Amino acid sequence: MKFIVLLAAIIPPLVILTYGIAKARDGWKSEATWNAFLIGAVSALAALAIELALGYLLPLARTGAVAEAGLTAVLLAALPEESIKFFVLVSLAEKHVDVRRLQDILVLALAVSLGFATLENFFYVISAGGWKMIAALRAITAVPNHGIDGLAMGALLIRARLSGRAKDMTLALIVPVLLHAAYDFPLLVLRKDIGTIWFGILWLLVLAASSIFVIRLCNRMLAKAVASDRTAGRDDSSIESAGWLIAGGAMVLFAGPSLAAWAFHTKGVEVASVAIALSIFPIAFGIDSVLTGLKRRNSRRAAAAQALHCAP
């Protein structure tokens, strides 16, 4: 049973990391990626210490229920957690000797964030009474949200490395903080049983908007990173991943809603429908995986056809 609980905590982050590795055409044997993942996990302990200290020092309970939720989301969750991830990424993970491509930055940022999410997820799952439902819901919401934050940080750090502007470096921290806070705020208000319907809708809108924004940002910045790596001759280690993206995306498209529905299968059709709505992140990742894989496969076929046509 303990082994199953452990798997429930670590498999969801590894699934999302697989998505990032395939998207950046990287490999599982990268020491830099696993180094970033492990440091990210350790950094969760530092974030916990900071959050406990801030919670003790800041009298947020005096500000009112909604204001307290907003301040908690920013000051006690998003800012310390994303700041630590950013520090680990820029000061430690990115300095690894194996990091040669700009594309690697996206994987490293995702690995740091998911390492953090793995330890956090482990604590939530082992401390929960109904751990199966907690594990299922976190697999389709909280863990992918950490992945979204990491992808945003990585994409904007790529932009900063390409432009050399301090403004872009600042955005690589600020945007993940805002995304993280936007995710936490409606949930914290819901826990206080205030405006349940409206804040529930707001939370679902945040999931949809953040996934669309970050995936589009990643696609745009990753294309620029690939072009820069090829121009500089740094793209020779890239791995073709079209098949993995298509197959993996199709599996996630099926598994996400199925896992959500299973988590609420005893609670009736209405709640099951809500559960399926919660699988916005897996659906977004799945669609992007399939579309990216198909695009790469078509590009490869077009290149092969052109080469055959040009052959004497």
Image: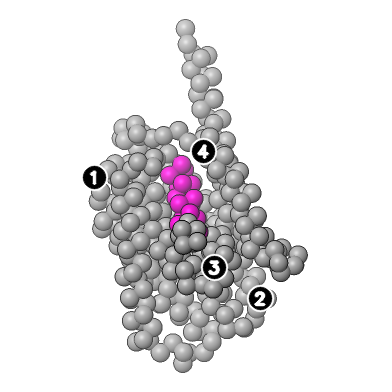
Q: Judge the density around disc 3: few (<14), some (14-19), many (≥20) Cα neighbours within 10 Å.
A: some
What residue did someone put label 4 on? 244
Q: Which residue is mark 1?
A: 97
Q: Is residue 299 above or below residue 257?
A: above
**Residue 110 % position (x, y):** 41, 54
Kindly report the distance in space between the C-alpha atoms of the residues bearing marks 3 and 4.
30 Å
Residue under pointer 2: 198
Residue 75 in the image: x percent, y percent? 40, 77
Task: Magenta stretch: give its range.
Answer: 8-23
Disc 1 + disc 3, Cβ < 8 Å? no
Residue 91 placement, left or right of 266: left
Q: Amino acid at mark 4?
A: Trp
CA–CA distance in space, label 4 to label 1: 27 Å
For the point 45% across and 79% down, the residue is 72
Tell me how far mark 1 sits from mark 3, CA to CA. Answer: 40 Å
Q: Amino acid at mark 1?
A: Val
- Label 1 environment density (alpha carbons within 10 Å; few <14, some 14–19, many ≥20): few
Q: Which residue is mark 3?
A: 131
- Mark 4 / mark 2, whichever is N-terminal: 2
